[in-house]
Amino acid sequence: MAASAKILTLENHTQNGEWTTVVPRRGRHRRNSQKITTAEGQQQEQQLWVPTDLEIDPGRQSKLMHKVQICMKRIENSRFFLTFLDQMQSAEILNHFHRVLGSELKLQMVIYGIGSIESHETPRLQLGLAVLMKRKFNWIGDIEVFDPVLSATESRVLEALGCSVLSVNEQGRRQVMKPTLFFMPHCEAELYSNLLQENWGVESLNRVALFGNSFETYEQHVSFKYYDQEVSFMDSSVVESVTHIVAARRFTDEFRIKTVSDDYFAAFHDSSWHFFRPACQNEVRLN
């Protein structure tokens, strides 16, 4: 897949795709797709996408922008945000960001699986944190966003906040060509796995910073099932979905964030920063 999918232009597309992530998809959608080849030589569909609802409602847009701004203000003035910034600016984590950046000046941000920012407060809090990060740190570059449940109104609000909405459902399979921060709180394991699989190599993984579900927790869950002799009863697709996640643990530096208060637990619990540092190709062998 190309380093970045096309940016959404409502006038240019009339069909959309499916991808179940944070919230259930809204009915069946027709889709227009084409075959692409992944980093491992497998054929995958690249699905062109447009919002679930093409109607632009200025009243809804204004109301939603107000809700997002309220969430951002809440976060900005919270002890959670101060703690979060302190952790990001610690010497250990800053060194990882500098390593990922290399000689580049900006770290592109990609947000997958944000969910409906109009229907739920949790996605608004997550989006608010991402936008505040960009405003706080001048080394965070452009923000690209994708979730198949986004409406046209939500897309307009995202654009007003300085984000670009992708017009292609990458299904997490973004091949990293430059330093990239993936902001993926509470996504499905399959999306993390797709991202890792697409970049399963020393050079690519070292260009990635990931904010999302704790990989350590995934590994503990699989180990718990194994030692309880329940692994044979686990669905094979579930096991496959965490294969790359568990394998990546051996060369991942993970830093759990502190939610500090119950106000932010639902949006950010069990979330971590992940930095990948495989030193040689042998480290990225799956067996």
Image (cartoon, helix red, strand yellow):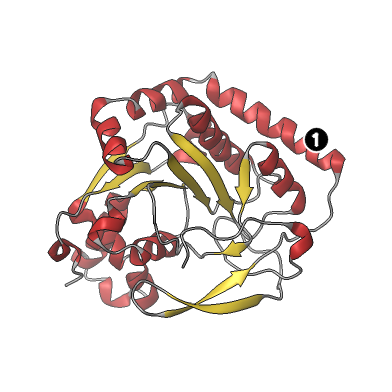
Q: Residue at x 71, y 72 (%)?
A: 29
Q: Is residue 164 above or below residue 29?
A: above
Answer yes or no: is residue 224 visible. Answer: no
Q: Is residue 139 above or below residue 110?
A: above
178 or 237, which is in the foreground? 178
Q: Residue furthest front?
A: 103
230 or 198, which is in the foreground? 198
Residue 14 location (% of width, % of height):
76, 69
Q: Secondary structure at mark 1?
A: helix
Which picture quadrant has residue 151?
bottom right
Residue 287 located left or right of residue 152: left
Residue type for callout 1: Ser
Residue 60 located left or right of residue 20: right
Q: Is residue 219 above or below residue 76?
A: below
Quarter of the image where the C terminus is located: bottom left
Residue 33 location (% of width, % of height):
61, 77
Residue 42 located left or right of residue 230: right
Residue density around tag 1, few if under 14, some if 14–19, many if 20 or more, within 10 Å:
few
Q: Residue at x 66, y 43 (%)?
A: 158
Which picture quadrant has residue 7?
bottom right
Q: Which residue is mark 1?
A: 62
Answer yes or no: is residue 132 visible. Answer: yes
25 or 56, which is in the foreground? 56
Which picture quadrant has residue 87?
top left
Residue 77 location (% of width, % of height):
54, 18
Q: Residue at x 51, y 65 (%)?
A: 171
Total number of numbered labels? 1
Residue 15 location (% of width, % of height):
72, 71
